[in-house]
Image (tube, rainbow, N blue to C red):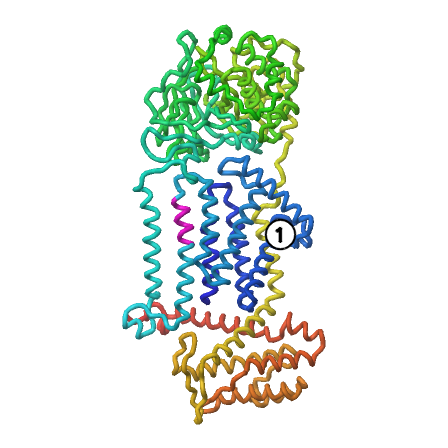
């Protein structure tokens, strides 16, 4: 393999190594195989273009066009011309995919599903980075600046991902870049002349090992990687940086003074509710007889900026053995302590620990911290719930309507923090809240009327097909359209409660789930939920349920529920089998309260919903892409091989004659310097090889234009035949005879003196032959040259040599066979 081909291979490998840092961001990882194939195809086109050779800008243009055609074939096959040529429809489709991909990036939590838009953004981005790296490192022979696009690719991934394996992706990406630098360094060193390395005996035999500077570079690179990985572990942890661990919901560092600055967990709620097949997130057993209030709470969102709700940045501490009494809970409120054992699925990785609220104690293995305001446990330094089993003690708080109605005003600091609404909140939110709660005598009645407005008598419908929405107008738009899912209902009720002076926040977690035959409860993806929590002094943070047909309305909110008639809707029958179903479970689509009211919606329409068309499977696209490239490469292979062979032969002649050389009177060649490390005593042999190569190019050119070679003729006879059959003019005939004379010199003269300008003679003859034939012969000479048969002959000779070598190795007693090697 040539040095440039090795460098191109290393550039592609470095790009894919840096792209591995994107693996934690999306699931599944099939996009990497697709990206690897596209990068390999783009790199191969660049290698062919450089062998022709083409100008550097043309080489990059060929690679860019190839990348565009491949992306069109994979992502816009139905909208393109002939399946891979981008037209207006394909460009429009690309724009739609990029737009949906940018929206998906904002909606999904990590790891995000591999939607068509996200797949185009990742694969297309890797392909662009691969083009930049190949152009810098191989086309322009500057591997060091190629680290900038690699760094950009890795930085994007590092800034978004969070996990214990981040150091591994850094190691992979850095190793790829180091490999690229070493490949370029070796290629540069080899151009200076002979490679010196190994022991003196090895240098004398010409079997020295790796280049000494390259070995030193490997050692330096290994030490540098080790320092980059080990030194940060010994340095003090810093918080607040762009790539800080707080992006995952925990502070980086040790001690009790860390802060939590969590990402918004709601970005994945809608997608969990829309999964085609429900997957079990966790299972639990509890000693409570009533599980309808067993909401598994993950985190509380209490910072409202008018655009969205998110967890506020708060200090976290070590997990105490017994959690303190919940804020605001008085002694006269009825409560029952229960114990629950929870087992999370092996695939479910959550930074927060799902627990019944309010928890009073938790026994959990791993590195967890406690956030006292939200009463949540958060994983520290990459700790997640994946495959975790833990025990939780919690309270079932059962206040009466009278206790809630008689609740005094909350403490001023708490009220100030949890009734904040931004100035950007549309006025219609507060106006609607006052209108709905008109005539209420206390905050409890206001809260119940808000819940009933959304869940019962406000005309709202539940739909997960509605976009979550962003911006200050999202709540106003929901109040107008009256259609959404739990995010809309909980956001709107919490915001409206704050405008009424009721402290409010939004909780995120899971509804109780479905009972199983063995007495346990199963919680699935479709049980993901969000609900508002309102604060009442003497009771504390209290759950409400404004989302229709989801969860259960708390018993303390049902005494004032309006008794208006609700149209009865047939309830779907419950299956007696334990086989999984793609239809939503009863627990997730109809609450116990709604079943009592006979208000459960018909789920037959939801059962008929089908998954969106994400296009053909990646392996089918890959197979068709390989087939298309093969069909394209087979007819072009003769032309490409011919261009390559002509370039090598004529370039070798220029290379051999580029050094200062003279021909003495007795035919000796005096050589001052020969590039490429050719020793002076081999100059004559090198010149002879170059002369024979250019003669082969002449005979192949004549063959391409209809004059087949005759191996029985001498060079002089062959030259005369080419001149006669090609009807060459005098300058071209003279060029042919000069080439024949040069061949006779190197074959028969005791001290040959090669002729200069042989490459120019070949071009002169080629031009004359081209002008003497018709258009059909000219096109065939370019697209389907007859001399390409030598490619098959070469392949046959190599196959025969391989078989002979393999037979010799397997035959005992044959030199070179196993067991016959000398010591």
Q: Residue at x 58, y 72 (%)?
A: 642
Which corner quadrant of the image does residue 326 belong to? top left
Q: Which residues are magenta?
A: 167-176
Q: Which quadrant, please, contains the C terminus?
A: bottom left
Classed neighbour count for the residue bearing mark 1: other residues with Cα under 10 Å, few (<14), some (14–19), many (≥20): many
Q: Left or right of 562: which side holds 310?
A: left
How many dots with numbers?
1
Q: Secondary structure at mark 1?
A: helix
- Position above or below: 418 against 365: above
Residue 467 % position (x, y): 60, 31
- Position above or below: 631 against 271: below
Q: Left or right of 639: which side holds 519?
A: left
Residue 279 % position (x, y): 51, 32
Can residue 575 be seen in this snapshot? no
Report which residue position mark 1 lands on. Answer: 73
Front residue of 414 and 133:
414
Front residue of 355 and 431:
431
Residue 388 % position (x, y): 40, 31
Q: Main secondary structure of the magenta part?
A: helix
């Amino acid at each position: 393999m040539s040095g440039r081909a090795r460098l191109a291979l290393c550039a592609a490998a470095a790009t894919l190594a840096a792209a591995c840092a994107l693996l934690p961001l999306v699931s599944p990882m099939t996009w990497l195989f697709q990206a690897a194939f596209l990068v390999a195809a783009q790199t191969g086109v660049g290698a062919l273009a450089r062998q022709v050779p083409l100008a550097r800008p043309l080489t990059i243009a060929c690679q860019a066009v190839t990348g565009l055609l491949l992306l069109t074939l994979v992502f816009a096959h139905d909208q393109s011309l002939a399946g891979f040529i981008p037209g207006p429809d394909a460009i429009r489709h690309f724009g739609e995919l990029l737009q949906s991909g940018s929206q998906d990036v904002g909606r999904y939590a990590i790891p995000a599903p591999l939607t068509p838009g996200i797949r185009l953004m990742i694969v297309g981005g890797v392909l662009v980075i691969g083009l930049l790296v190949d152009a810098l490192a191989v086309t322009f022979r500057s591997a060091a600046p190629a680290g900038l696009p690699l760094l950009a690719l890795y930085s994007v991934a590092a800034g978004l991902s969070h996990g214990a394996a981040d150091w591994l992706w850094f190691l992979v990406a850095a190793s790829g870049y180091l490999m690229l630098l070493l490949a370029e360094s070796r290629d540069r060193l080899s151009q200076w002349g002979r490679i010196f390395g190994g022991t003196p005996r090895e240098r004398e035999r010409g079997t020295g090992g790796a280049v000494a500077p390259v070995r030193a570079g490997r050692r330096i690179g290994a030490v540098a990687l080790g320092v980059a990985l080990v030194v940060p572990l010994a340095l003090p942890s810093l918080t607040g940086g762009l790539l800080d661990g707080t992006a995952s919901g925990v502070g980086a560092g040790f001690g009790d003074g860390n802060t939590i600055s969590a990402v918004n967990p709601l970005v994945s709620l809608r997608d969990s509710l829309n999964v085609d097949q429900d997957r079990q997130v966790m299972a639990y057993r509890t000693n409570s007889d009533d599980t309808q209030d067993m909401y598994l709470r993950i985190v509380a969102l209490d910072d409202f900026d008018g655009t969205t709700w998110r967890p506020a940045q708060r200090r976290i501490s070590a997990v105490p053995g017994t959690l303190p009494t919940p804020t605001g809970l008085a002694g006269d409120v009825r409560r029952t302590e229960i114990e629950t054992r929870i087992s999370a699925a092996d695939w479910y990785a959550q930074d927060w620990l799902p627990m019944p609220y309010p928890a009073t104690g938790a026994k959990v293995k791993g590195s967890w911290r406690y956030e006292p305001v939200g009463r949540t446990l958060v994983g520290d330094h990459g700790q997640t719930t994946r495959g975790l089993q833990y025990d939780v003690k919690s309270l079932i708080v059962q206040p009466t309507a009278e206790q809630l109605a008689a609740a005094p005003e909350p403490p001023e600091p708490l009220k100030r923090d949890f009734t904040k609404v931004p100035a950007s909140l549309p006025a219609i939110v507060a106006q609607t809240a006052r209108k709905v709660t008109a005539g209420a005598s206390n905050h409890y009645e206001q809260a119940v009327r808000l819940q009933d407005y959304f869940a019962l008598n406000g005309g709202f419908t539940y739909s997960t097909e509605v976009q979550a929405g962003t911006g200050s107008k999202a709540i106003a738009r929901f109040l107008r359209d009256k259609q959404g899912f739990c995010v809309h209902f909980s956001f709107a009720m919490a915001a409206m409660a704050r405008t009424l002076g009721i402290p409010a926040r939004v909780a995120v977690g899971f509804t109780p789930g479905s009972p199983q035959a063995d007495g346990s409860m199963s919680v699935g993806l479709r049980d993901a939920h969000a609900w508002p929590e309102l604060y009442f002094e003497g009771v504390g943070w209290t759950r409400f349920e404004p989302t229709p047909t989801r969860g259960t309305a708390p018993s303390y909110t049902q005494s004032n529920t309006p008794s208006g008639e609700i149209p009865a809707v047939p309830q779907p029958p419950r299956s007696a089998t334990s086989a999984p179903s793609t239809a939503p479970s009863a627990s997730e689509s109809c609450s116990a309260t709604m079943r009592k009211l006979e208000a459960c919606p018909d789920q037959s329409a939801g059962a008929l919903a089908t998954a969106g068309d994400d296009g053909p499977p990646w392996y089918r696209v890959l197979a068709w892409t390989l087939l298309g490239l093969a069909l394209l490469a087979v007819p072009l292979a003769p032309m490409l091989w011919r261009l390559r062979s002509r370039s090598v032969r004529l370039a070798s002649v220029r290379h051999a004659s580029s050094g200062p050389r003279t021909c003495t009177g007795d035919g000796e060649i005096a050589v001052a310097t020969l590039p490429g490390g050719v020793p002076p005593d081999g100059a004559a042999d090198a010149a002879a090889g170059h002369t024979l190569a250019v003669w082969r190019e002449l005979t192949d050119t004549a063959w391409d234009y209809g004059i087949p070679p005759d191996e029985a003729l001498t060079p002089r006879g062959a030259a005369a035949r080419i001149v006669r059959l090609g009807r060459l003019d005098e300058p071209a005939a003279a060029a042919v005879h000069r080439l024949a004379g040069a061949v006779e010199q190197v074959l028969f003269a005791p001290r040959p003196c090669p002729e200069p300008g042989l490459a120019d003679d070949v071009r002169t003859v080629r031009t004359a032959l081209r002008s003497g034939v018709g258009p059909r012969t000219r096109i065939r000479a370019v697209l389907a040259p007859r001399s390409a048969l030598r490619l098959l002959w070469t392949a046959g000779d190599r196959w025969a040599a391989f078989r002979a070598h393999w037979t010799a190795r397997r035959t005992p007693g044959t030199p070179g066979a196993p067991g016959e090697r000398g010591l």
